[in-house]
Structures are given as C-alpha cells and as structure tokens.
Amino acid sequence: MHLLFFIGSITVSFEFVLILALFIYIAYLHFILAKKNILLKTYFDKIEKTDSKLDKKDIIQFLENIKNTNYTKPATRDRILDKKISNFIFENENEIKLFLHYTPSEEIAKKILIEGFKFANSFYKTAEYIYNDKLYLIQRHHEHKQFGDYVIVICISKDLFNDYSEKLNGVNAKDITVEQILFEKQPYTDDNGDLIYTLPHQYIKGYFNYREGTIFENKDFNISYNSDIFTENLKKYN
C-alpha cells in the first residue's frame, strides 16, 4: 500500500514538472513572438517615413534575418548605441562617405591609424558602408561584430569622393573604384596574389571598442585630404 502511494506521488510529480516545462516553453515562445512583433512594427514605422534612408535591399535583408529565431533583439547589449559612440561615428554625416571596419586587436587598430587602411582588391569587402539609421546600424553591427571588438571609422569627404568618381567615369578605368585611386603608397602583391592598396591614414577618424565604449581619435584626421599623387594615379588610366 505504501509502495503504491509512493509510486503515485512520483507520477504526479513527473506530470507536474512536465506541465510546468511546457508552460515555460509556451511563455518563452510568446515572449519571442512579442519581441519580433515590436521589432517589425518599429521597422515598418521607419519605412513609412518619407525621409527614411532605408533601401529596399536593407528591408529585404532585415526580413530574411528576422526568420532566424536568434534574431529577436531590436537593440544590442554592447555600447555601440551609446550617445558618445553615435556622435563619434556620425559627426558631420552629411559631408562624408562613412565606413566601418572591425578588427580583433587594439594593436591592429593603432597600426591602421598610423599606416593607413590596407585592403585587398575591393575596399568594400572589408569596409562596411554605413549611414545614420539606428536599426540599420544594429543590423550591420551584428553581422560584423564577430570580426573583433575594435571598430575603425573611415570618413571621406563627399565632395572629394564625387570629384574623383566623376573623373574616373571620364577615363578608361573599368572596375576601378575611387578608393583604388586614393593611395600614396604603391600597391603591392601579397602572398595570396592579391593586390594590396593602402588608404591614407588621414581618412581614419579613429576607432572605438564597442564593448567598453572607449574612443581613440586620430590627430591627423582630415576628410578632405588630397594628394598630388592621387591625380598621378588617375592619369594611369588615360
């Protein structure tokens, strides 16, 4: 008799734990769904604004991301949304072409400030174009933060960029970008056979650590830096 009562108690306890586990799981699913709904509403509110900077491809990319059950946060826990970080990134945003590059160590970040930004063949494979939209920034940040805690901020004057872009259109320079003209150190071939360009360090505004919120500025930063060598580089395509 006592044995049957004991077994029955165990059965009841197991059923209770199972029901409780199911309840917790259902509550978790509701929580995830609610967060996705809030995130979607925020995004669609931005799309409906006439002054929204979001491109169609950004919207499509976001909708693809939100299918992922891990992509549920409209904000990030690190410091990239801090006001001082945002001000550092987007200062004079209307005057610049703005790019971010993630790197794993401060030693590399400091080296870039001194030597310039090196890239293989295509600048856009390693530097991410960015503009001042919170959700866009979060999306790009989550895609690239795996590459390191230190973020290099690269800024080039729009006037300078557009000027060289127009000049490139007038010469035989197929598949050559403005960044491949803006170099003073001659490109070289690395061990992989890739052509390495170096963007002058004057275009590096500085870097920040998105986990700690620390910022280091480049004292030589100049968005309008222009060298006679740039013109010589362009002449090679005449």
Image (spheres, rainbow, N blue to C red):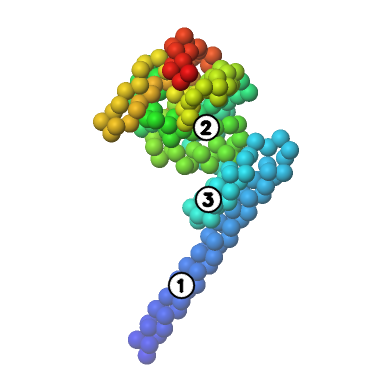
Q: From what the image shows, is residue 95 above or below residue 174? A: above
Instruction: Say which of marks 3 and 2 sits in front.
Output: 2
Furthest residue toward bottom: 1
As shown in the figure, which amino acid type bears the numbered disc 3?
Asn
As shown in the figure, which amino acid type bears the numbered disc 2?
Tyr
In x, y percent, where is residue 204? 46, 20
Instruction: Say which of marks 1 and 3 sits in front.
Output: 3
Q: What residue did someone put label 1 on?
A: 18
Q: What residue did someone put label 3 on?
A: 65
Residue at point 55%, 22% (across, down):
170
Residue closer to the observer: 103 or 236: 236
Mark before the other along the chain sequence, 2 or 1: 1
Mark before the other along the chain sequence, 1 or 3: 1
Furthest residue toward top: 228
Q: Is residue 172 left or right of residue 186?
A: right
As shown in the figure, which amino acid type bears the numbered disc 1?
Leu
